[in-house]
Amino acid sequence: MAKLEIQESDNGIKQVKVIGRLDILGTGEVETSFTAHTAGKKEKVIVDLSELDFLASIGIRLFLITAKAQAKRGGKIVLLNPKPLVEDTLVTAGINLLIPIYNDLELASDDLNSAVSE
Amino acid sequence: MTVSTHNTLPHTGTTEILCYLTLKNKFDELNKLSVWINNDISTLFKISERTVFKVDLILAELIANIISYAYPSQCESEIVIKCHYFQDNIRIDIEDSGIPFNPLITPDVVLPQSLEEADIGGLGIHLIRHYMDEGTYQRKDNKNIFSVRLKI
């Protein structure tokens, strides 16, 4: 089971918190909404993973689809505060080489603001 | 359905705990799987959060793969998962009667170095191989029997 919380801030950065489990069922529950919020237009997106308890390959696939879409549009996504076991899965899949992972909101925001032009 | 038994193995004197679950080859059965791992297996075997996560990930990937690809005719069938706990390791046997498939001989995915070259699929088998310590496959009585062993 999974759900999303969306927060848009004044600095133009959208935060999407993913809560629960991104297995095949959880990903199916949030996939359409996640993609609509993160891949529809050029965005600066922080995906907050602090309340994500479980991540399978289908959830990783969701992040990759968004990251590829944003790269094409001139936007960017970064991942924030994954729990250690979730971060281990991301690193095992090599995602840390493709999508930056931060444990500090300010650093994540600085990366997006410097990488994405208005 | 979960059943557990405790047996003393005669050749070693160690105690084996067996717990098993039978699922239909339907995606909505996966919720039952995660509850079984995170409640029953976790409590009965008293294993660490990290080991529970590994078991969860390996089984989530394997069972999703079986449901997606093992039954091209979409006929209803059963997948049996047997989890054996020993003193320093867990062995999980996954049995299905789908088409023959050995996860150990599929080519491993090449991890991409850039978003442009990143392939969207193929990570599931890579994760299974990474998180298990040992895997064996046999085809017997028209069934795939895949066994994984994890040190604890």
Image (cartoon, rainbow, N blue to C red):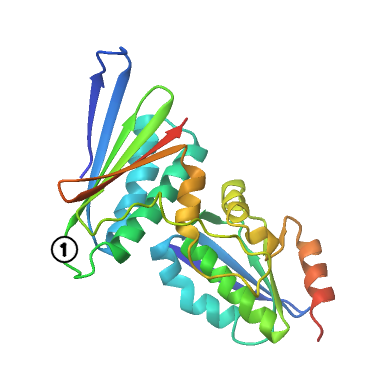
Tag count: 1
Question: Compared with residue A63, is residue B95 higher up or lower down, i.e. above or below?
Answer: above
Q: Position of residue B52 (x, y in %)?
A: 45, 41
- Report the side of A75 relative to A65 (left or right): right
Residue B1, quarter of the rendered image: top left
Classify mark 1: residues with Cα within 10 Å, few (<14), some (14-19) or many (20+): few
- Report the side of A104 relative to A52 (left or right): right
Q: Residue at x 52, y 39 (%)?
A: B50
Query: Which amino acid is tagged 1?
Result: Glu
Disc 1 designates what residue? B76
- Circle 1 marks a residue in which chain? B
Q: Residue at x 52, y 68 (%)?
A: A61
Q: Residue at x 43, y 60 (%)?
A: A23
Depth check: give the residue in front, B17 or A71. A71
Q: Position of residue A26 (x, y in %)?
A: 43, 64
Question: Compared with residue A71, is residue B59 higher up or lower down, i.e. above or below?
Answer: above
Q: Position of residue B99 (x, y in %)?
A: 23, 59
Depth check: give the residue in front, A6 or B41. B41
- SS at mark 1 in the image: loop
Question: Compared with residue B79, is residue A68 higher up or lower down, i.e. above or below?
Answer: below
Residue B83, quarter of the rendered image: top left
